[in-house]
Image: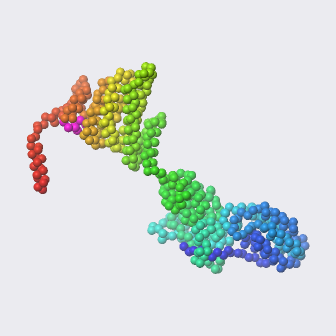
Amino acid sequence: MTLGGPKKRHRATGPSGSGHLSTIAVIDSSLSDKSVAEVNQTRRRTPNTTGAAGSDSSLSDKSVAEVTQTRRRTPSTTGAAGSDSSLSDKSVAEVTQTRRRTPNTTGAAGSDSSLSDKSVAEVTQARRRIPNTTGAAGSNNIFFNDSSTADVILRLFVDTASSTESSSDSRSVDNSPSTSVYLHSDILRRSNYFSALLSDRWMGHSKLDDSDNLFRLNLSVPPTPGSFQSHLTVLELLYTNDFVNTIDSASAALDLLAVALELLFEDCIRSCITFLEAVPWTEEEEKRVLNLIPLMSEEESNELLARISPLREDLCEEMLEGLIHSAIHNYQNTAYVKAFVAKILKDFSSRESAKRVLEKAFNMSLKKVKESLEEYSSPDFRGDHNETEAIQRLNLHKAMTNGKHLLWLVERMIELRVADAAVKEWSEQAAFTADLQRAFRDDAWRNMPPGLPAFMLRCTCKLANAVAAGTILATRPVRRKLVEDWLPVLVACKDNVAATLPINKSLEETFLRIISTLPMSDAQELLQQCLSFSTRNVEDCPHLVTAFNTWFRRAAQPLNQDHGQMRQLHQLTWNFL
């Protein structure tokens, strides 16, 4: 970039005589004490001899007093460095005394070398009507891209060298490769970038055109769509401060924020960040925010990072736990909520996180079922009989409700193929299955809907099917214990609670398939417990017939005495090779 040169304000001077007011208006919109003194000295040296009747070119004491009061009531809001837009009491007194000593004898028609009361009033009213909204050093009557008052020409050009890819879109934004803007150094200093560029340190490197006393600076623009317009908008915001109407979408805020960060325009940066913090983003806009975060200070980026940066590593698991708990406990239409949470779990990227969350929820629900059943199996009979019966019913209801939740969790774990721990835990429930058998043999169950038995058997069937299908690779001890502990529960349920549950036949077939994977001795012991699977018509239980036929076929195999010798020969051959 070509750096800025020494600052020289461009001044417009008018001819002597009637040009004092125009000179003051062009040089500065406010009258300083020094300017008033110069005007007084000029008037002392140039007596007015025009003498036109009916006109008075001097300010009377009353007029000066009115001007003084007016300017005292109108404080300076321009913020210009090194200038004062109001006349001090001392300056006004000097002007009053000078004008009293200098009689008015001009009166020339069509010209007036002094400021009349009317002219000063018009200047004062004009300044009142034009409020300063820029907050920049300088006067109010300067505008963006105003060539008549500018002292800086900024050339914006596409920096194709900074990108390895050519951008046809950037050419469509601006037909020319560059454009020039007329600006003012006092306004540009609102940007810390331009303030440093126009500072004394870089004066010697600045490019000053002696023909028109203008600084000529260059600023590269990335070859991206809309980049030219974004730079021009930010430059115009240096003059207008109209952030509210300009920043009207997250996309616009991101476009302007990138330029504001480049030019170190703090007011614009704050406005863009404030807008972005308050509105939602699309996925693409979020990526752009992440790309801009490194360019911001920590204070500026905190509000945006709070939305997209996790505070802890386990935040996803905590969220999943909350979703599962809400789906199970907090909604009446649990079917819809559970279906939605099931989709979230299925689409979740981290399988291990989902596994840990589901295992935790599974163990918690299983614990509640076991506790409720224990309270049912060991009731406190010290109270009233009706009260005890009500408590028993409540315990059964708790067990059934948590059994329903347990089934949903088992289905989710099998769907995600993370039910290994659940199968192992389910196979180690000897005490729990004993409580279930006692409860199912209780006469009270005959008058109750078979909710809990159905849920327990369905959980067992889901896990056993996954083991038999190879979805879950369970060890031999786990397979044996799974059948050994839960087969009596199935038998007790058929005999006492719900002999015609559809799940019974399916679970029988699954248990027999698992038994076929066990050693002969284990299968022999477990098959003898399956006789209750038989029906009145032998043809109605082919699964039981097939299981016994398979076992007897294997048991009838002749013992091969040569197996050991064949293994030894094979080992010797392998060692020789």
Q: Position of residue 443 (x, y in %)?
A: 35, 21
Residue at the image position 51 percent from the left and 57 percent from the top: 289
Q: Does residue 517 belong to the magenta stretch?
A: yes
Residue at the image position 55 percent from the left and 63 percent from the top: 261
- 77 relative to 197 in the view: left or right: right
Looking at the image, residue 498 lies above or below residue 162: above
User: Which quadrant holds residue 94?
Assistant: bottom right
- 98 relative to 549 in the view: left or right: right
In this view, the residue in front, 295 or 144, is 295
Looking at the image, residue 277 lies above or below residue 432: below
- 409 relative to 505 in the view: left or right: right
Q: Position of residue 364 (x, y in %)?
A: 40, 37
Residue at the image position 45 percent from the left and 68 percent from the top: 164
Which residue in the rendered view is the most extreme toward the right?
Answer: 53
In this view, the residue in front, 100 or 471, is 100
Q: Position of residue 311 (x, y in %)?
A: 48, 51
Q: Which residues are magenta?
A: 513-520
The answer to whether residue 130 of the structure is visible from this angle is yes
Q: Quadrant of the C terminus?
A: bottom left
User: Which quadrant holds residue 70?
Assistant: bottom right
Q: Does residue 446 belong to the magenta stretch?
A: no
Q: Quadrant of the N terminus?
A: bottom right
Which residue in the rendered view is the most extreme toward the front?
Answer: 382
Figure disc tally? 0
Q: Position of residue 165 (x, y in %)?
A: 45, 67
User: Which quadrant holds residue 417?
Assistant: top left
The answer to whether residue 542 of the structure is visible from this angle is no
Looking at the image, residue 74 lies above or below residue 386: below
